[in-house]
C-alpha cells in the first residue's frame, strides 16, 4: 500500500500483519479471526483494512483507530473466499463464499447485506468488479457460467458463445462451461453480450 508504505498480509495462523516495506519493521499484528484468513483488501480512500476468512466473517479494521476491528459482518454461512470493492461506488463491496452466494455490502452496513446473489450452484471462489463501462460483477465458482442481474435478482441469466437468450423473463443457459459468472448492476441486459471472454 503505497500511501502508507505498508505491506499487509493475512495467513493461516489467523493473524493479519502490517509491515513497513522500506524498513521491514512490523507495524501491527491484528487478531480477531478464528479460522484461516482468505483475503485482505485495502480500501482506496478510507483508513480500512477489510479481511475475510474461513470463520465465515468479514472484518473491517480502522488503522486511524489503533487498528481496531470496528465491524464484523456475519451473514455468510461458509468460508468467505474473496472480497472486492466497487470502483464506481467506494462505499460498497462484494464478498464471495463457499455457501454458493455473493453478497453486496455497504461500509455502513450494520450486519445485513444490501443484496444476496444466489445464482451459483456450488461454492464461489473469486469475484471482481468489471473495470470498464459495463456495470458487471464477475465471479468464479465450482459450477458453470451463470449471469445474475442485480436489480432483477429473481431472474437467472445464462451465457453461451452466441450470446444471452431471453425466454419469458428468464435466461436459458445454452452451454455449460466452467466456473465464471457475471452479475450486472443495470436493469437492462443486452442479447448482444456475447464476448464474455473479452470482458474477463
Image (cartoon, grey):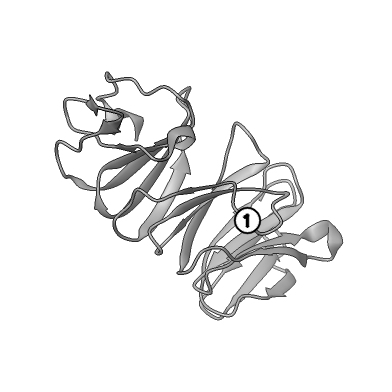
Which picture quadrant has residue 195? top left
- Tell me what residue is drawn at x 30 percent, y 59 percent: 122
- Tell me what residue is drawn at x 59 percent, y 35 percent: 87
Left-right relation of 148 to 151: left
Indicate the position of residue 93 as horizontal and vertical percent values: 58, 46
Figure check: 190 above or below 143? above
Picture mark count = 1
Residue at the spot of label 1: 112
Left-right relation of 107 to 160: right
Figure check: 129 above or below 105? above
Which picture quadrant has residue 34? bottom right
Q: Nearer the viewer, residue 60 or 184?
A: 184
Indicate the position of residue 163 as horizontal and vertical percent values: 22, 25
Q: Which residue lies furthest to the left in this view?
A: 175
Left-right relation of 161 to 67: left
Q: Residue furthest right?
A: 65
- Tell me what residue is drawn at x 67 percent, y 43 percent: 44
Figure check: 179 above or below 34? above
Indicate the position of residue 179 as horizontal and vertical percent values: 27, 50
Image quarter (top left, top right, bottom left or bottom right) of the C terminus: top left
Indicate the position of residue 140 as horizontal and vertical percent values: 34, 50
Mark 1 secondary-structure assignment: loop
- Tell me what residue is drawn at x 16 percent, y 44 percent: 176
Amino acid at each position: 500500500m503505497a500511501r502508507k508504505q505498508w505491506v499487509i498480509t493475512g495467513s493461516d495462523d489467523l493473524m493479519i500483519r502490517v509491515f513497513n516495506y522500506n524498513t521491514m519493521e512490523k507495524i501491527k499484528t491484528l487478531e480477531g479471526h478464528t479460522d484461516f484468513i482468505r483475503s485482505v483488501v485495502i480500501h482506496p480512500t478510507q483508513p480500512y483494512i477489510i479481511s475475510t476468512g474461513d470463520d465465515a466473517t468479514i472484518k473491517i479494521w480502522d488503522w486511524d483507530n489503533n487498528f481496531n476491528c470496528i465491524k464484523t459482518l456475519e451473514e455468510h454461512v461458509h468460508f468467505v473466499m474473496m472480497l472486492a470493492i466497487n470502483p464506481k461506488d467506494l462505499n460498497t463491496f462484494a464478498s464471495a463464499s463457499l455457501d454458493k452466494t455473493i453478497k453486496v455490502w455497504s461500509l455502513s452496513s450494520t450486519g445485513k447485506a444490501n443484496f444476496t446473489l444466489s445464482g451459483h450452484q456450488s461454492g464461489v471462489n473469486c469475484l471482481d468488479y468489471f473495470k470498464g463501462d459495463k456495470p458487471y460483477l464477475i465471479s468464479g465458482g465450482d459450477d458453470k457460467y451463470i449471469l445474475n442481474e442485480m436489480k432483477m435478482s429473481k431472474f437467472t441469466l445464462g451465457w453461451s458463445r452466441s450470446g444471452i437468450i431471453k425466454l419469458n423473463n428468464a435466461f436459458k443457459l445454452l452451454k455449460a462451461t466452467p466456473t465464471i459468472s457475471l452479475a450486472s448492476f443495470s436493469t437492462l441486459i443486452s442479447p448482444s453480450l456475447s464476448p464474455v471472454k473479452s470482458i474477463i
